[in-house]
Image (cartoon, rainbow, N blue to C red):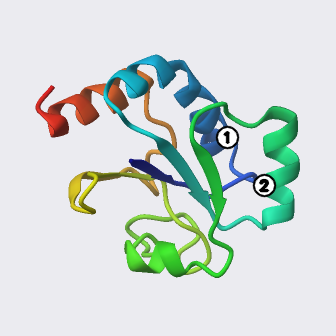
């Protein structure tokens, strides 16, 4: 599973990243990876967005109470433009046993990562 933590619907680069990850669906499927976008946005906001223009891959989940973001240490000033209130722009690859195979925190300075860099890092982490 590839977790994509991001600042959510009010962040244009995050929206673009969530949308652009759709272009990697075929490659993720071949690698047996499900993409899960995680934001602090409410379920109602995410549901409305997902039905109108959301990505086709995996899932987009609400972490409104930030419990998952805290668990993965996504709220610090070295990771988020809004420390303590929204997760930063980070990817975490978790294998089927729950072990983290790769993690990259891009925020707060990098708010968009080209798809070729994402898929290359995932492939390296998997030894593919």
Q: Count numbered badges in the picture.
A: 2
Is 79 drawn above or below residue 34 in the view shown?
Answer: below
121 sits to left or right of 36: left
User: Which quarter of the picture shows residue 53?
Assistant: top right
Badge 1: residue crowd in 10 Å (few <14, some 14–19, many ≥20): some
User: Circle 2 is placed at which residue position?
Assistant: 46
**Element at label 1:** helix
Q: Which residue is drawn at 38% across and 37% down?
A: 33
How far apart in space, not on screen, are marks 2 and 1 (Cα)?
11 Å
User: Which quarter of the picture shows residue 94?
Assistant: bottom left
Q: Residue at x 64, y 58 (%)?
A: 61
Is 90 drawn above or below residue 30 in the view shown?
Answer: below
Q: Which residue is drawn at 28% across and 53% down?
A: 96
User: Circle 1 is placed at which residue position?
Assistant: 15
Q: Position of residue 14 (x, y in %)?
A: 61, 44
The disc, 2 or 1, on the residue closer to the chain's N-terminal end is 1
Badge 2: residue crowd in 10 Å (few <14, some 14–19, many ≥20): some
In the rendered view of the protein, which quadrant contains the C terminus? top left
Q: Residue at x 16, y 32 (%)?
A: 124
35 sits to left or right of 56: left
Is 21 drawn above or below residue 107 in the view shown?
Answer: above
């Amino acid at each position: 599973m590839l977790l994509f933590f991001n600042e959510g619907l009010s962040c244009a680069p995050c929206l673009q990243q969530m949308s652009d990850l759709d272009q990697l669906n075929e490659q993720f499927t071949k690698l047996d990876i499900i993409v899960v976008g995680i934001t602090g946005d409410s379920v109602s906001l995410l549901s409305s967005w997902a039905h109108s223009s959301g990505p086709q891959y995996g899932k987009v989940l609400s972490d409104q109470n930030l419990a998952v973001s805290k668990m993965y240490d996504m709220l610090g000033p070295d990771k988020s433009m809004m420390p303590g209130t929204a997760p930063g722009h980070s990817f975490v690859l978790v294998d089927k046993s729950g072990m983290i195979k790769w993690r990259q925190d891009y925020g707060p300075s990098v708010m968009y990562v080209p798809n070729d860099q994402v898929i290359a890092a995932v492939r390296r982490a998997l030894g593919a």
